[in-house]
Amino acid sequence: MRLGGPVWPDEATPAAWVQALQREGYTAAYWPTPSDAPPAEIRAYRDTAAEHGLVIAEVGAWSNPLSPEPAEARQASEHCKRQLELAERAGARCCVNIAGSCSSQWDGPHPDNLTEATFARIVEVVQEIIDAVGPEQTTYTLETMPWAYPDSPESYLALIEAIDRPRFAVHLDPVNLVNSPQRYYSNGALIDRCFDLLGRRVRSCHAKDIRLAQRLTVHLDEAPPGEGELDYATYLRRLDACDPATPLMLEHLARPEQYRAAAAYIRSVARDTGIAFR
């Protein structure tokens, strides 16, 4: 298991990027260049990461292939293909996007998101992206979401079976699956279910936390690791039993000191659980 997060290098070079990761004690990284970076630059970052034993966790493809606007949906699909190609060239474990949304907000709730028709559309979109690129090393993944597929380990497994592509895999963010008080108070069991059904296909994971507010009706808010109720002991224990290169990536914090506090918390839970990061 690896820990990683965003870094702010002193300059835009592979050497400075690696030094920034090492300063934070990270052994996994987000890919730092755009898809249109010169091929020599992409190779330099890839090779420098490999020389220092760093895992490239993921290349983001954040966009909405399910947009109700056809032009936006096409642009998003093409963006996903470019990012999947980049992930292949970079040696990343995965390219990750959300499935998308039928809303005008790219990641927003919509009454059609969790329907059979949208499920079928996701299958077609993902198949088309993977088939167009034909990756041999990396994978295409969908981040779990609270109001769009995959919204549970069961719906993720159903997508895997329906998409039926070896290069489709799992990106796990358990916080995004906590969308009710029931899941909030039993999130350890939810995490276990995710790994029971999906563990062998997990390529990258996100690290954050969640908090249930003490006001009506129901308010679930994202929080930094250690400031919510996610069962990190279970999360780390199950991650540790996966592929040793599996990354846990910090996200959504504003400042370097917040990332350091979050990393310190996760490392403390790992120590208390008898787990060591690589």
Image (tube, rainbow, N blue to C red):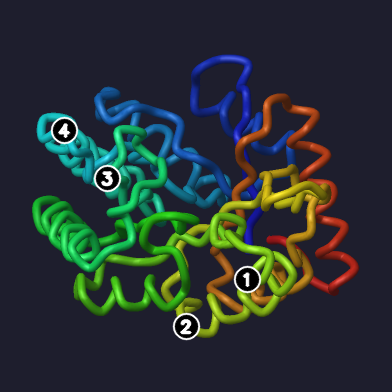
Of marks 1 and 4, which one's residue comes earlier in the chain?
4
**Residue 145 location in percent, x, y?**
46, 55
Q: Nearer the viewer, residue 226 or 136?
A: 226
Of marks 1 and 3, which one's residue comes earlier in the chain?
3
Q: Which residue is mark 1?
A: 239
Of marks 2 and 4, which one's residue comes earlier in the chain?
4
Tag 1 and tag 3, C-beta contact below 8 Å: no
Label 1 vs label 3: CA separation?
A: 32 Å
Q: Nearer the viewer, residue 249 or 28?
A: 249
**Residue 223 location in percent, x, y?**
73, 43
Task: Give the amino acid at mark 1.
Answer: Leu
Label 1 vs label 4: CA separation?
A: 38 Å
Question: How dense is the environment of label 3, judged by Cα within 10 Å: few (below 14), some, or many (20 and up)?
Answer: many
Q: Which residue is mark 2?
A: 197
Of marks 3 and 2, which one's residue comes earlier in the chain?
3
Label 2 vs label 4: CA separation?
A: 34 Å
Q: Is residue 138 visible?
A: no
Q: Nearer the viewer, residue 85 or 71?
A: 71
Residue appearing at x 74%, y 37% in the figure? 24
Q: Which residue is mark 4?
A: 69
Secondary structure beneath label 3? loop
Q: Is residue 85 left or right of residue 9?
A: left
Task: Give the amino acid at mark 4.
Answer: Glu
Residue appearing at x 28%, y 30% in the figure? 35
Of marks 4 and 3, which one's residue comes earlier in the chain?
4
Label 1 vs label 2: CA separation?
A: 13 Å
Q: Which residue is mark 3?
A: 102
Question: How dense is the environment of label 1, judged by Cα within 10 Å: few (below 14), some, or many (20 and up)?
Answer: many
Quadrant of the image containing the N terminus:
bottom right
Quadrant of the image containing the C terminus:
bottom right
